[in-house]
Each structure stands twice: as C-alpha cells, then as structure tokens.
Amino acid sequence: MRGAPVAILALLVGCVAPSDVDDPLADVSELGVLSFDATGRTPPIDLGEPSEATFLLARSDDDTCFALEPSLFAARGAALDAVGAAPSRYQRIRCSTGTPLREPLADALEVSVLERDQVTAGRLPVRFVVTERSALRGDSAAQQAMLEALRSELAEAGIAPELTAVVEVEGAPTETRFSDLETDELDALLALAPAPAPGTVDVVFAGCLRRVGPTGLSSAVLGFTGRVGGGGGGTADAVFLPGIRCGAIGADLAPVDVERTAHVLAHELGHFLGLAHTDGGDDIMHTNPLLEGAHGFTSEQARRMRLHPFVRSR
C-alpha cells in the first residue's frame, strides 16, 4: 500500500506540451473481466493475428499477483504486456513466493487491448523523483548532466529521454527493502511525490536499496525496476536507483558518478520498456551492466523498446 505524502518540494524543469500529457493507455479496447480457474489460469486470450505492437493491459487489486504465459513476468495489481502470435493466458501467482497459485478466483482480472504503430525514433518522458538520500538533490547541474549522459546511452536505440520535471521529496528512509512482488516500501517512496503525467517513467533516487531473495537473505542492488514491461500501473511501477552505499558508516550520500549512474539507468529503462536480462551477451542488458563489454543495445532490443506505448513519435 502507498502511504500518505510526508513533504514535497517540487521543481519543474520544463513545461509539458498538451500532446505530451495525453495518456498513451487511454485508447484501449476492453476484452472483459476474466476469472482464474482451479489451475489458477484464465481462459486463453486469442486475438487472432495481433501485430507486433499489440499489448494487453490487465488490472486487478493490489493483493492479486499474476503473469502472462509464456513470458511469466510476474506482476502485482496491474500489468502491461506485449502479445505474441500464440494465444496467451494469465497464470495466478503466489505473491509471497512468485510461484504458480493453483486456486480459482472469480472475476479477478479486467483485460483490455492496445494497438499502436511501430516507432522508428521516439521520445520517452521521464521524471526524476529525488529524495534527501541522494546527492543529486538540489544539484541542477548534475541532474542535467545525468539527462545528457542518459541521452547518449539511449541514442543508438532511437530513443530520446525527455526530462519533464524534477520533484524533490522528503521522508525517504536510509534503507529500503523489497522483493520482486513485496514492494510496500518502494510504493511508499513513490507516494512521497504527486502522480506523474500519464505516460511518464518515474526515476526515484532513493537511499540504500536491498532486494530480499526467496531464502530471506538480502543484497544491495545497483538499481531496480518494478517489472519487466512497466507502465501498467501496478505496484512499484517505476525505476529506483540508490543514493547511499548499503552498510556505509553514517549512511553518507554516495558521490554522483553521472556516467555510471546513467549507464545503470539505461539498463533499468530497458527493463521498463520490456527487455529481460541477456545470457552471455555483450550488450547493456547483461545481468551486470557494469561489466566492461556491457554497452549498447542490439537492433532487436531497440526495436522492442520502441514498441512500448510510452515511447512517442518525435
């Protein structure tokens, strides 16, 4: 659940044109409300011959977790998924473990379809939410340098990030813990800021980020995206980056390494726009994006990213 805002100091860095605030998910066609059967699955969703830019938008309550087969990228509350040629169905997931939940649930999932055109070069609206746990706070020069470095990272993919606003917030903890589907503390960070304009990716510069694994052990992360294929409005629907080294004495703010942070941010935006990790590849979507050879996107990765509804035509 998202908590109440504590304090907000908003600094707008640019005006957003009316065309930029149009909701890219508004023009959807409703399929109806689906139920999970005794196997925890919905009936197959047969869209005939969907285009490569067909998406399903599924919405439920925040206590329901599910994933679209065959991708199986787990979601909590809502999901936005690109659809392949084969009929798809949703599998109910146990929120605590991410494993299939073989139980029925009636009238649980509102599903809609979105069709869009392929974008050959596009704009991606982003908003920086900067907590007091990040050295970026109050440093407009570093914020602008971050944007320029991010533009350089994404240029080869044909995507130009546009910073619509910087919102500085207070009330963030030194450390935030979460798992892939248990994201209450991440949602509390998002709740410190007002809702972004439709179709905008929130990038939250927080404190130490610790991801809790299935065994209960936690590890510090370079960054985290709530789901591969973001933008559907589910829990933790944003990109999160740490501003404090976990375990640092006195929780000192980490100095801003603009190039390094922008590189990790480009990797996380790849996840938000629908890319999973690559196995043994030499692109930026490698499991460790800071490896020496982990740079750039493949042509197929770039094409898939530009299919995402948040990427607008230039």
Image: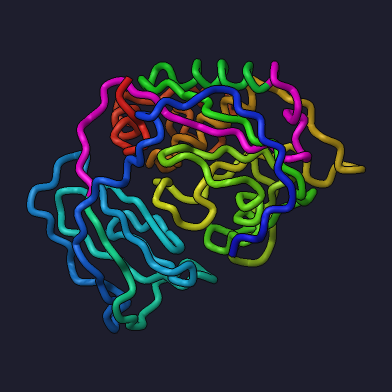
**Quarter of the image that includes the C terminus:** top left
- Residue 275's image quarter? top left
Magenta region:
114-142
In the image, what residue occupies the spot 70% across and 16% down?
Answer: 141
Residue 81 to residue 299: above or below: below
In the image, what residue occupies the spot 64% across and 24% down?
Answer: 260
Residue 7, image x, y percentages: 74, 47
Residue 184, image x, y percentages: 62, 62
Residue 50 to residue 1: above or below: above
On the picture, is 85 further left or further right than 213?
A: left
**Quarter of the image that includes the N terminus:** bottom right
The color scheme shown is rainbow
Q: Is residue 279 visible?
A: no
In the image, what residue occupies the spot 63% across and 45% down?
Answer: 193
The residue at the far left in this view is: 48
Residue 139 to residue 10: above or below: above
Asked whether 204 or 72 is in front, the reply is 204
The residue at the far right in this view is: 250
Asked whether 301 or 171 is in front, the reply is 171
Residue 237, image x, y percentages: 50, 50
Asked whether 72 or 52 is in front, the reply is 52
> Does the magenta portion include 13?
no
Q: Is residue 56 visible?
A: yes
Residue 161, image x, y percentages: 47, 24
On the picture, is 313 further left or further right than 197?
A: left
In the image, what residue occupies the spot 72% across and 40% down?
Answer: 131
- Residue 288's image quarter? top right
